[in-house]
């Protein structure tokens, strides 16, 4: 049926009705409350898990300037007005400041003389692939019990890392050490409610349907159908998808957060479905990342995906880390960051000294940006040396976006060392129940997700 035919039938089949006074208008109260909530959250919020303060409005300007974009000076005026409106509870003024700031951000332009703009940003996987030499695939049997064990280890590494990290994110090493000392326990009863696993499940659903033929549009479909809300780059991309703007454009339109950690936090599941295959892990990571990220933001997911994929066949975490760093081209900012961190690790006596060097080097970046968190990952992998508890203690102690960082690298460590490397004291307080904020599954079990992952890979490989 053509659209005009549907509209004709809708008109001609409609029977007149008389509505009551209450029925004659829309109730706008819920719409107003929803708009107010999300605009206020953009300007002033606290991280749900840790209570750390943040402002995406300020961070949006910061992020654009980090990558060498000139934001019109008018941004300072609207930031001042918006933050004042939040303090005063003036929602009308806040909505105006919000719209005006977004308009100013859209006027930002890259400065070709800025150091960041003089570095390489790949616009496609083909361009990236041409710049690196992937290690050859290593045959790995996905049909055996070992694969089931490693997948369980990978998922539990993520779940534990995220559960520990959600209580710690958004704080510095010094503040965390003063408050908690060594990160060797859950700081509160753990749960599985976080965005890291949510977005990985969306990829898993798409992969289960399409296998290695999955596309970024397929992943976007599962974002739209299953994920109700998102944050920073993912929020922009999700809104773009709902407007019919699909990848890679979904990551580009009105997105100042395109090099933040949101793609980097999704790499583990991609590596889990490509065991031993660095190039394939990188390719799948690229298509997943480009839903919401560009440039160095995409490389963040590639890094973690390759790290996890090769953890199935390389158990020396220092060698694995160094080899994964080598796959991040040195002429990209991301490549420079992980090389700086690796050099800091090699020349430092302990993780605290190495992390202090990185923390100082990337102090201008938001704690949710990919760069300081990528550096923290390298430091923890290097000094953790494949020990699950030690790696967790270090990545937790580094602060910043702890849940994302811990989930990703503990997946790699656990896969490399096997499920038995995870002490039961991390698993027992959580149990098998897995709770998400997705439309489906709102509740499932970790064992079911592990089984789904194993089945999807075996089916795709058959």
Image (cartoon, grey):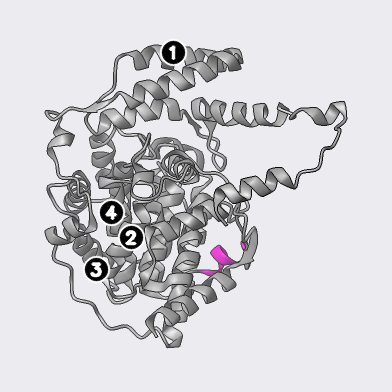
Does residue 438 belong to the magenta stretch? no
Q: In whole angstroms, how far apart are the C-alphas of marks 4 and 2?
A: 19 Å
Q: Position of residue 238 (x, y in %)?
A: 48, 45
Which mark is drawn over residue 279?
Answer: 3
Residue that carries the numbered disc 4 in the rendered image: 378
| Residue 431 position by quadrant | bottom right
- Determine contact: label 2, label 1, CB under 8 Å: no
Check whether the beta carbons of the residues at disc 3 and disc 1 lie within 8 A of each other. no
As displayed, is residue 298 above or below residue 218? Answer: above
* Residue visible at 48% across and 49% down in the picture: 165
Q: Can you give x and y, in whole percent of width and height, for residue 199 in the image? A: 48, 55
Q: Neighbour class for label 2 at 10 Å: few (<14), some, many (≥20)?
A: many
* Residue 420 visible within the image: no
Camera-nearest residue between 446 and 317: 446
* Residue with the mark numbered 2: 285
Q: Position of residue 299 (x, y in %)?
A: 27, 52
Mark 2: which secondary structure? helix
Specify start and end residues of the magenta stretch as a single range: 423-431
Q: Secondary structure at mark 1?
A: helix
Q: Is residue 23 visible?
A: yes
How far, Cα to Cα, is label 4 from label 3?
20 Å
Q: Is residue 381 left or right of residue 46?
A: left
């Amino acid at each position: 049926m053509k659209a005009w035919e549907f509209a004709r039938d809708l008109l001609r089949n409609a029977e007149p009705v008389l509505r009551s006074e209450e029925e004659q208008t829309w109730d706008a109260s819920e719409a107003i409350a929803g708009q107010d909530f999300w605009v206020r959250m953009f300007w002033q919020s606290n991280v749900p898990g840790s209570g750390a303060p943040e402002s995406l409005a300020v961070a949006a300007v910061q992020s654009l300037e980090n990558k060498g974009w000139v934001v019109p000076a008018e941004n300072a005026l609207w930031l001042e007005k918006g933050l004042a409106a939040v303090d005063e509870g003036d929602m009308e003024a806040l909505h105006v400041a919000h719209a005006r700031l977004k308009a100013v951000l859209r006027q930002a332009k890259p400065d070709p003389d800025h150091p960041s703009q003089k570095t390489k940003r790949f616009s496609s996987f083909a361009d990236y692939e041409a710049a690196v030499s992937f290690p050859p695939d290593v045959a790995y049997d996905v049909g055996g019990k070992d694969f089931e064990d490693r997948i369980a280890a990978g998922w539990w590494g993520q779940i534990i890392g995220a559960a520990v990290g959600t209580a710690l994110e958004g704080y510095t090493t010094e503040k965390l050490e003063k408050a908690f000392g060594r990160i060797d326990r859950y700081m509160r009863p753990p749960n599985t409610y976080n965005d890291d696993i949510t977005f990985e499940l969306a990829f898993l659903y798409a992969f289960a349907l399409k296998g290695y033929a999955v596309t970024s549009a397929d992943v976007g479909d599962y974002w739209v159908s299953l994920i109700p809300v998102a944050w920073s780059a993912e929020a922009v991309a999700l809104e773009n998808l709902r407007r019919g703007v699909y990848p890679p454009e979904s990551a580009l339109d009105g997105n100042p957060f395109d090099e933040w950690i949101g793609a980097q936090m999704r790499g583990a599941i991609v590596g889990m479905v490509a065991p031993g295959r660095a190039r394939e892990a990188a390719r799948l990571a690229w298509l997943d990342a480009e839903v919401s990220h560009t440039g160095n933001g995409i490389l963040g997911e590639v890094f973690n995906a390759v790290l996890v994929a090769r953890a199935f066949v390389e158990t020396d975490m220092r060698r694995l880390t160094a080899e994964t760093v080598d796959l991040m081209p040195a002429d990209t900012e991301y490549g420079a960051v992980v090389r700086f961190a690796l050099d800091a690790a090699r020349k430092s006596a302990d993780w605290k000294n190495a992390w202090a060097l990185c923390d100082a080097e990337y102090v201008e970046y938001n704690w949710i940006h990919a760069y300081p968190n990528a550096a923290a990952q390298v430091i923890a992998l290097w000094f953790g040396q494949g020990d699950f508890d030690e790696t967790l203690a270090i990545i937790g102690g580094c602060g910043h976006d702890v849940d994302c960082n811990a989930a990703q690298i503990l997946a790699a460590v656990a896969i490399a060392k096997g499920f038995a490397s995870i002490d039961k004291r991390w698993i027992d307080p959580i149990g098998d129940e897995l709770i998400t904020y997705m439309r489906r599954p709102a509740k499932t079990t970790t064992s079911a997700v592990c089984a789904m992952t194993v089945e999807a890979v075996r089916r795709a490989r058959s």
